[in-house]
Structures are given as structure tokens and as C-alpha cells.
Amino acid sequence: MIRSNPRNLIIEKWQDDRIFAEQQIAGINPYAVKRVTSKPCPRKWILVGNNCYKLFFANPYSNFQEARAICKAYSSNLAILSNSIEAAKVNEEFRSATDDDDVSVYVDGADGMWSDGSLVKDATNQPNKFKKCLTARMTPSGIKFTYSYCLYSVRRIASLCQKSANYDGVKISALKPFLNPSFNWRKAFESKLKSTLLTHSNKLLDAIQDGRVFVVEFPELRGIRSSPDTDEVHNDGRTMHPLASPIAFFVSNPDINGGEFLPVAIQTNSTRNSPVYTPADGDDWKIAKILVQSAALATTEILEHLLHSHFLNDPICASYKRNIPPQHPLGQLLRQHCLGTLSTSKVAEDILLPAKGKVDKIFTVGFQGQLDILNNGFNAWSYKMNDPNYRLKKAGVLDKKMLPFYPFRDDGLEVYKFIGEFVRDYVYLYYKSDADVVQDLEIQGWANELALGAFGTANSGKGKIRDFPKSFTTRAQLIDTLQKFIWSSSCHHAAANFPVIDYATFVPNMPGKFYDVKNVTGFDLRRFPTKRQSSRQVEVTFNLGLLHYDSLLDYAKKLKDSKATALVTKYKIRIEILQIKLEARNNANVAKGHLSYNYLHPANIPNSIST
């Protein structure tokens, strides 16, 4: 049983493999895990266009509700065949499977309308109160649509299910150039694939296609510079272990222990001759896990925390002060979500980033590596990445059936949706139409100054924010922009910052550096940072993770307009209800033996980047 206090648990069981694995999905880096992919469709599904299709036959899937239920069980929906070109291709693919037995299949278009909003065309009859569920027959002359009874069980009716083809995650072909070809990967994976569900296969290639194989890798550390060890003492026999970019693989057994997530193997660096270790390899396995943890700490704090949270929100907060008056409705809102951001980032620049600063001293990457990570990360960054839906989809980890325990995803998407609803209502208070948005010169100046590629004034585009709107043309666009910003300044920062106090203050679990020591082999505590080095890491991580200045949407009384005060008060009550829901889910996860995760509970999310 994994108890609810991660910090105490880490001290007691920091070498436990399951705890190591769950730190990748409930620890300091919210986006660490990515699905490994091979083909765009699951096993036994057929790719047509950009969708995957599968037929399910016979009882008990013989009425509309049961047909829809079986599709839902496979994370899919009844087929939407509104695209005539794709429908023709579906007809060709499945005609041989249905034509001989004169089989009809339930599809999506009930009541004359496909769920994508388009009308059902060319049906042989019209829906009525008795026959309103759409079926399709595959014939040599094309698909024939007919409205049939929804609740009348017809023996020879099947269901045609559809899901979007998956092109997200990390393709196995993209990983192969980095992987050691001499290692028996299949054996290692299949020793951990233990699902008992009939719909799952425990063969490696099948499990990849099903979405049960995951990777944690650190491309940010490939090919970058590293600085000399600032704490090196000549002739003491201790040499800083070289900078590495390890690759760690995991599998999911969704039906075991409430969603079992297990480590499989770790390759210690991203070169084909790097050794690979498994849980059977004793000290070498322990060292491999330490290399992953060390890489995770460095990349999370430099990339997800400093760059994605602090430095990429600094221009937004600086520019709003230059363009939007304090009494402006958005000036009132942005003030709450920029509070302390610029001053906190200035402290970080002065203390953490210089040569011989805290980052240089704590992390193997050092001063030079930190600069490479920041520069490369900025060049790869887009404002789209402030949407957790976008990043989680790109990582291929939205499927809750294949990865049941992923609390950042589950809590984060609910909070992000809540923020969107709040921002929508706030914008609607003051902008009654898109024309009102277009005519607001203050927010137009803000956008023009921030967006990469904007032009027209001496300050245009100075924020260099890729994919930030160059101007606002609709209320929806303004809502989307503010939703992303509030998420980044509050939630993303909370998820990347506050877990360090639980996972990185106990240095053996997540050391900034690791050492090779003369006459010391294998796993040995003498290879960890010294007392002085450890104290430095503990000091920084406690300073980062200890202070919660305020909590999300607690600022109703600070707003000047009574309408805004009333709206924020209403949403503060709603967020307290969401807090109760997330607490209950966390308690249920802990009861199943999972790590506790409360970093995105609204009470623990500050409004701005204040630490």
C-alpha cells in the first residue's frame, strides 16, 4: 500500500520500482511519459482515411444502445459516415464481411443527424418515432442507409465502431536509432506485460499497437554542452558522472492493481552502444534509475519550470502593464495572475542562472548545458503548448483505459476546462460581440507587442511568442488566449514547481549530480552528492516548493467592478466543489495503492508565479 504522504514515502521506499515508475506520471514532470506507437490503429482495426474502423457481430450487440456501448468499451464511437469519400472506402473494406449474410450495421446518425452536425443524406427512409436509429448495409453499389428500430433486437445487426487514427506519441521507428540493438527488448517487455483481459495481448508488438507501452526520454539533453563540476576537488577520487540522456521504458497493465504502471528497462544514454538494465540487474539497475531521476530533475526545473512557466510568462505580464490600464477589465484580471511573476523571475535570474549559480552547482548540465536547454526549448516552444489537451494528445496519453492512473491528466484537464468556463463568462461580461473585441485598442496593442512576427509599430513582436495572436478578432480567440495564460501562470507552474519538495528534498531519490568514485563499484552512497552539495539542493527545492501565496480565484474582493466580483465569487464556490471531487478521486487512488497527487487541487494552485 502506498501511503498518502509522498515525502515520507520517498524517504522510506525510494528504491522501490513501482514508486520510481509512478513518479514519472505523478511526480515533478507532468509531461514526462509518452506513448510508444507503431501503427495508427489498434490490432484488428482497419485504417480508412484518418479513422480506424472495426465491426462487432452478433448477440448481445444487437440493438442500438448495446451497439453504442460496445464501441464505448473500446474507446470509440459508432461510425460517423458523413464523408461520402470515406464512406465509400469503408463500404469496400467491410463489404465482404457483411454481404454474404445480409448483415446491417448500426452507425451514428440517429434522428437524421450525424454527431458532427451534418445531415444524413440518401437514407432509404426518414426517421420517425419508431424507427430513428440508423443502420447501414455494405453493397456492391455503395452503402445503403436505413432507419430501423432502436430497441428491437435484430439478430443479424452488428455495430460499426470508429475512432481517430493515432499519430501521436513517439514512433518506435524514431526511437530505434538510439536503442542498443544487442539488447533483448522483447524478452524484457513481455516479462512485465501481465494483463488478464481478453482484449489485451501481452506480446510486445501487440501491446505497442494497443497503447500499453510508454517511454520517458530526454531529447533536451542530447548533444548539449556541460560545464565542469564546480565542486570538483583535485585528487579526491570523485569525478562527476558524465551528462547522459537515458531512455526508460514502462508498460501498463490496466486491469491489475487499479492500473499497474511498471518499469521495464533503462538504457543509460541515447547512444546505440549504451548498456541497458532491467530490474533483474541489481546495482546497475539502481544506478540506471538514478540517472533517469537526475535527468528528470534537471530538465523539469530548467525547461518546464524556468522556461515554460517563468520566462515565457514574463513578457505577457510586462506587456500587459505597458498596454492595458489598471482599471481595464482585463487589466484587473491579468493583475491577479501576474502578481509577483516578474520579481520572482528576476530573483531566479540572479540566483539560479549565472555561472557558479545554483543551477550550475546543483545539476550535471551546469551553466553551459542550462543555456542550451533554454535556447533549444524556446526555439521549439509554441503558445499552443499552454493547452494541456494539446500536449497530452501529442504525447499519446489521453486514453484512460490504457493508462488509468495519470492524475496530472485527469485533474489537469478538469481544472483547465473550469478555467475556460470562467474566462468565457468574464469576457462575456464586457465584450458583447466580436466587434467589441476588435475595437479594444488596448488589448490589440498587447497582442501586437507579444506575437512573434507582428508588425506595425516599433514594439511589434518584441515578446517573440510563437503562435500568440497578432491581433484579437473574436471573443472565442480572446477566451482561448486568456485560458492558456491562466493555466500556465497558475496550474502548469504548480504542477512543475511544488512536487520538488516531496521528491527532490530527499537527495538520494533525485540527485542533481552523480559521481564516479575511485575504488568504488556498483551502487554506493559515496557516489551521491556530498553533505554540502545536498544541503544546497535541499535549500533550493524547499524555497521553490514551500510557499503557496494564495489560491486559485480567491481575489473577488480585490476587483473594482461589482459584476466581476459577483462572477468570481460564483466561480470560487464552484471551484470548492471541484476541490472536493478531486480530493475524493485522490483518496480513491491512494486506497488502490497509488501515489498521492494533490498539486492540481484548486486550494493548492496559486493564481500566479509567486515562487
Image (cartoon, rainbow, N blue to C red):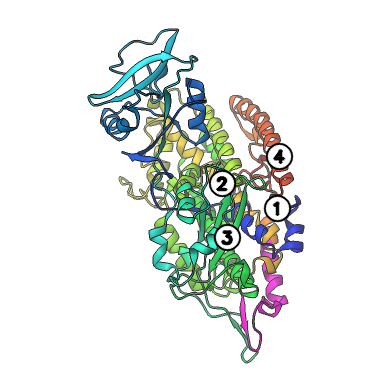
Magenta stretch holds residue 208:
no
495 and 95: which is toward the camera: 95
Q: Decide which of 59, 241 is in the foreground and name it.
A: 59
| Image position, residue 261 (x, y; %) | 61, 53
Q: Earlier in the sequence, mark 4 or mark 3?
A: 3
Mark 4 vs mark 2, foreground winner is 2
Q: Which residue is mark 1?
A: 547
Seen in the picture, residue 222 relative to 440 is either above or below; the reply is below
Q: Secondary structure at mark 1?
A: loop
> Can you say whether 433 is above or below 35 in the image?
above
Viewer-nearest of labels 1 and 4? 4
Q: Secondary structure at mark 2?
A: loop
Which span of residues is magenta-colored? 514-541
Residue denoted by label 3: 191
Q: What residue lies at 68% left-to-right and 47% top-to-bottom?
A: 549
Q: Is residue 50 visible?
A: no
Per the image, the residue denoted by label 4 is 583
Furthest-bottom residue in view?
A: 235
Q: Secondary structure at mark 4?
A: helix
Query: Residue 463 placed where, x, y %?
Result: 41, 51
Cα distance between the residues tagged 3 and 2 = 19 Å
Q: Check if mark 2's residue and mark 1's residue have beta carbons within 8 Å.
A: no
Gap in angstroms between the C-alphas marked 4 and 3: 35 Å
The C terminus lies in quadrant: bottom right
Q: Nearer the viewer, mark 3 or mark 2?
A: 3
Viewer-nearest of discs 3 and 1: 3
Judge from the rendering whether residue 465 lies leftward or rightward of residue 13; answer left or right.
left
Residue that lies at the very extreme toward the front in this rendered image: 100
